[in-house]
Amino acid sequence: MVSMEKITSLAKRRGFIFPGSEIYGGFGGFWDYGPLGTELKNNIKREWWKNMVYDREDVVGVDTAIIMNPKVWDVSGHLKALVDPLVECKICHKRFRADKKEILEKHGEEHDGQTDWTQTKTFNLMTEVLLGTSEPKEKAYLRGEITQGVFVNFSNIVNSTRVKIPFGVAQIGKAFRNEITPGNFTFRSREFEQMELEYFIKQEEGEAEKQFNFWKAERMSWYVSLGIAKDNLRFREHQDNERAHYAKAAVDIEYQAPFGWSEFEGIHNRGDYDLKNHKLTYKDENQEFIPWVIETSGGVDRTALFFLIDSYFEDGDRVILKLNPKLAPYKAAVFPLLANKEELVGKAKDVYKILKGKFHVAWDDRGNIGKRSFAQDEIGTPYCITVDFKTLEDDTVTVRDRDSAKQERVSVDKIEEYLQNKIG
Ligand code: GAP
């Protein structure tokens, strides 16, 4: 498996992910996405939205505020419950999560195997913000999960749309947690993006079990359909003592990362915990009740990171990101065989312009063709299109497939259709 050093170095070198505020020494737990990382993340979000909203008839989408009335977080239980158990090293006063045994053991090595830990203390992860211009300023919070925006708008959504139980509300957006030990690159950040579905159902154990199992299978198959190797994925059920305060049942989808099996999506049965606390009910012509909720909650940043790791291959000196074409930042790259032959460059520009209106495509006329292709392999571009002397004779181009390195000739007037069929 690829090392995290290789992934972080590729991510920075090729413009996927940069350390946040790097010119000021960085800022722990914050990351900036470069041009290619932004494309990758946008593609993940677009595929998720298509799968969860557009392909279904029972889901609507919302985009709610990051800062909400602080009462929301009191009622939702997050001010009391969104806490991490921490211990402090009495030798160097660094703090670590008490439940991360390997990290604690590793830290001991820094002190020649000597460890002296404080008692475990809990620490609230909600990020405080101060609002207003006059003193005292009003204390509020950056949302710790994007979910509460859906619950507080439950009646607005039901009254303004034609949804009927069972139905879902999808949302993608930023969340913030004052993580005490951010780490493993973007895996544990202080600012991150979530993509969530809240699926509202009748209050019945049988229905809850059916929907929970349905969404578990659905979410797992989404990752597999976009190319994550099945062997690198597994479900892990939460034990009673590790479930979030709102969950009656919880299962994680985990990925086998270089730093061990790690969660990238949680599926939760939240029962009526949230709507009941917010004193909200569902009402239609025949009934009024508090629905139960099955939630699927994934991280955009963790998904992007795991897709980068899973698609990374080496073939001698060549690095290939075998990203699904739907997720690849560029769908194709267009090259003139030689940069100093005007007819080739002109024709290649024509091909580039045909495709550019439809797909995100790259242009490259530096160095030799081999180097250009390798540079595109490294960022996951699935097809490299070369305009050569034969193009000038028969109006066909060479298309090279990233994964097989096989080449075929395609007529210029069919190139758009060809790419569309390949990308799907
Ligand atoms: N609404 C439920 C909820 O927030 P969660 O398991 O705490 O559940 C859901 O978070 C997902 O959000 C995680 O599976 C992960 O992908 C992402 N996530 C949570 N904390 C994160 C962090 N500190 N950095 C990056 N992603 C995080």
Image (spheres, rainbow, N blue to C red):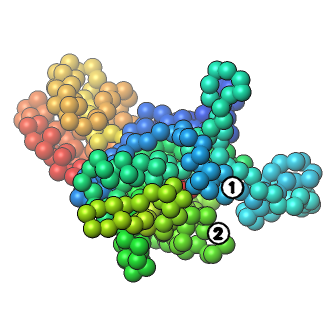
Rounded to the nearest angstrom, the CA distance separating label 2 from label 1 is 15 Å
Which one is nearer the viewer's eye here, 235 or 251? 251
Image height of 143 relative to 233, above or below: above
Element carrying mark 1: helix
Image height of 302 relative to 396, above or below: below
**Nearest to viewer (mark 2 / mark 1):** 1
Q: Residue 366 vs residue 337: left or right? A: right
The quarter of the image holding the N terminus is bottom right
Outermost residue, bottom direction? Answer: 206
Q: Is residue 100 visible?
A: yes
Q: Name the residue under label 1.
A: 80
Measured as percent of width and height from the top left, residue 173 is found at 46, 44
Q: Residue at x 93, y 51 (%)?
A: 91
Q: Is residue 274 visible?
A: no
Q: Residue at x 46, y 49 (%)?
A: 152
Q: Residue at x 44, y 42 (%)?
A: 64
**Which amino acid type is shown beneath numbered disc 2?**
Glu
Which one is nearer the viewer's eye here, 299 or 361? 299
Measured as percent of width and height from the top left, residue 257 is found at 56, 60
Q: In which image quadrant can residue 162 be found?
A: bottom left
Element carrying mark 2: helix
Which one is nearer the viewer's eye here, 54 or 260? 54
Between disc 2 and disc 1, whose residue precedes?
1
Q: Residue 358 vs residue 85: left or right? A: left
**Which amino acid type is shown beneath numbered disc 1?**
Lys
- Disc number placed over residue 242 in the picture, else none: 2
Q: Residue 297 vs residue 57: left or right? A: right
Measured as percent of width and height from the top left, residue 407 is found at 23, 48
**Ligand 1 picture quarter:** bottom right
Q: Residue at x 56, y 48 (%)?
A: 72
